[in-house]
Amino acid sequence: MSRSEQRVEIMTMLYQVLLYKKNKMEYNIDILLDDKDDFIKNIVNGVLEKETELEELANKYLNNWKLDRLGFTDQAIIKMGIYEILYTDTPNRVCINEAIELSKKYSDDSVVGIVNGVLDKVYHNEVSDAE
């Protein structure tokens, strides 16, 4: 399975978790991740572990919006993108491009620009200053 295909799985799992939380349903992330490879497990667990921080960063860079106004798919893509930029060795350009491609395929056209804008700002303001 390619990394792009793995990111679709990650997005789907994060979407599921958002649905479970919204509907106050119990879930066990370990069961969802049971047969998944390390890349998927690391990203999903990392996003859930750092969720508050990722949401705060997304909200910081969303102009006149809050993350919870976006659909669950969009939220999952943005959180995954920010997490990958900040906490993985994946080249930042790849993180941003993969998130944009996911949003082109699974979100409304208007969201593509939002995803690009947020991730670009996270990279330029949170990462490149630290490099």
Image: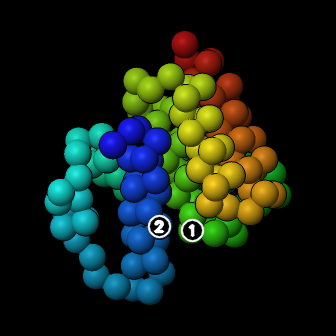
Q: Nearer the viewer, residue 65 or 33?
A: 33
Quadrant housing residue 120? top right
What residue is at 63 percent from the left and 44 percent from the top?
101
The answer to whether one can see residue 19 in this image is yes
The picture places residue 125, in percent across and down from the top left corner, at 67, 28
The picture places residue 68, in percent across and down from the top left corner, at 63, 68
- Work out which quarter of the rendered image holds the C terminus and state it: top right
Q: Residues within 10 Å of mark 2 (few under 14, many from 20)?
A: some
- Work out which quarter of the rendered image holds the N terminus and state it: top left
Q: Residues within 10 Å of mark 1 (few under 14, many from 20)?
A: many
Q: Nearer the viewer, residue 115 or 24?
A: 115
Q: Which numbered dot is residue 15?
A: 2
Q: According to the image, label 1 marks what residue?
A: 72
- The residue type indicated by label 2 comes to Tyr
Q: Are marks 2 and 1 in contact (CB under 8 Å)?
A: yes
Q: Nearer the viewer, residue 63 or 9?
A: 9
- The residue type indicated by label 1 comes to Phe
Q: Which numbered dot is residue 20?
A: none
What residue is at 22 percent from the left and 71 percent from the top?
28
Mark found first going from the N terminus, 2 or 1: 2
The picture places residue 23, in percent across and down from the top left corner, at 44, 86
What colouring does the structure picture have? Answer: rainbow
What residue is at 39 percent from the left and 39 percent from the top?
2
Q: Secondary structure at mark 1?
A: helix
What residue is at 65 percent from the left and 43 percent from the top?
100
The answer to whether one can see residue 56 in this image is no
Q: Secondary structure at mark 2?
A: helix
The picture places residue 57, in percent across and down from the top left corner, at 60, 45
